[in-house]
Amino acid sequence: MMNKSEIKTQEKQAASLPAKQWLTLNINGTEKKLELAPWTSLLDALREYLGLTGTKKGCDHGQCGACTVLVNGKRINSCLTLAVMQENKEITTIEGLAQGNALHPMQTAFIEHDAFQCGYCTPGQICSAVGLVNEGKAHTDDDIRELMSGNICRCGAYPNILEAIKQAKGEMNNA
Ligand code: FES
Ligand code: FES
């Protein structure tokens, strides 16, 4: 059990923790300054503070992949990382994949292969698929299925998602 002086020390330490702090995030090529509680997830920073609601919240604990974004070209679950940990990194969300009016080849391929139904998982699927191609590890259909297994599609659009990724992979590798 703590004595009085230890309790007072703990109270002082808690009182000195900043409720919020300023940070700068580089999102889709633009610097954004935000004042956030240090425990704010990157997902909540995107959706609740920056209005970037393309990134979806499914489970909020790393099980569904709906919140996938790219950080320095690598895919991560934005619900599992704190915004403050992503300062000075390049964050790309589904809103940042297109170049002006030109969709990213992965977006085009998803449309052409009808790789969605309700669309809720789609931003995460597309970001994850772009990261997958960047990794250069997916050589076969089974590789793609395995390496995309963290992205759940409740509508079961998996066969079409596979075909879309194969098409976009060819285009991205030839670009
Ligand atoms: Fe992040 Fe489900 S919302 S993995
Ligand atoms: Fe509905 Fe994937 S398209 S969850």
Image (cartoon, rainbow, N blue to C red):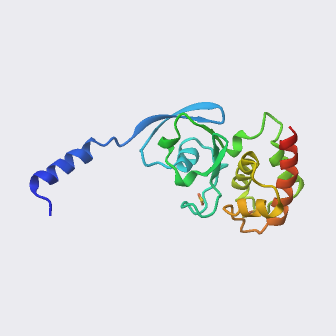
Residue 29 image position (x, y, % from top left): 65, 32
Q: Quadrant of the C terminus?
A: top right
Asked if residue 5 lies left or right of residue 17, the reply is left
In this view, the residue in front, 129 or 47, is 129
Q: Quadrant of the N terminus?
A: bottom left
In this view, the residue in front, 173 or 116, is 173
Asked if residue 132 lies left or right of residue 10, the reply is right
Residue 139 falls in which quadrant of the image? bottom right
Residue 85 image position (x, y, % from top left): 49, 42
For the point 58% across and 30% down, the residue is: 31
Asked if residue 156 lies left or right of residue 65, the reply is right
Residue 103 falls in which quadrant of the image? top right
Residue 87 image position (x, y, % from top left): 52, 36
- The answer to whether residue 148 is seen in the rendering is no
For the point 58% across and 48% down, the residue is: 47
In this view, the residue in front, 78 or 95, is 78
For the point 88% across and 40% down, the residue is: 174
For the point 61% across and 51% down, the residue is: 76
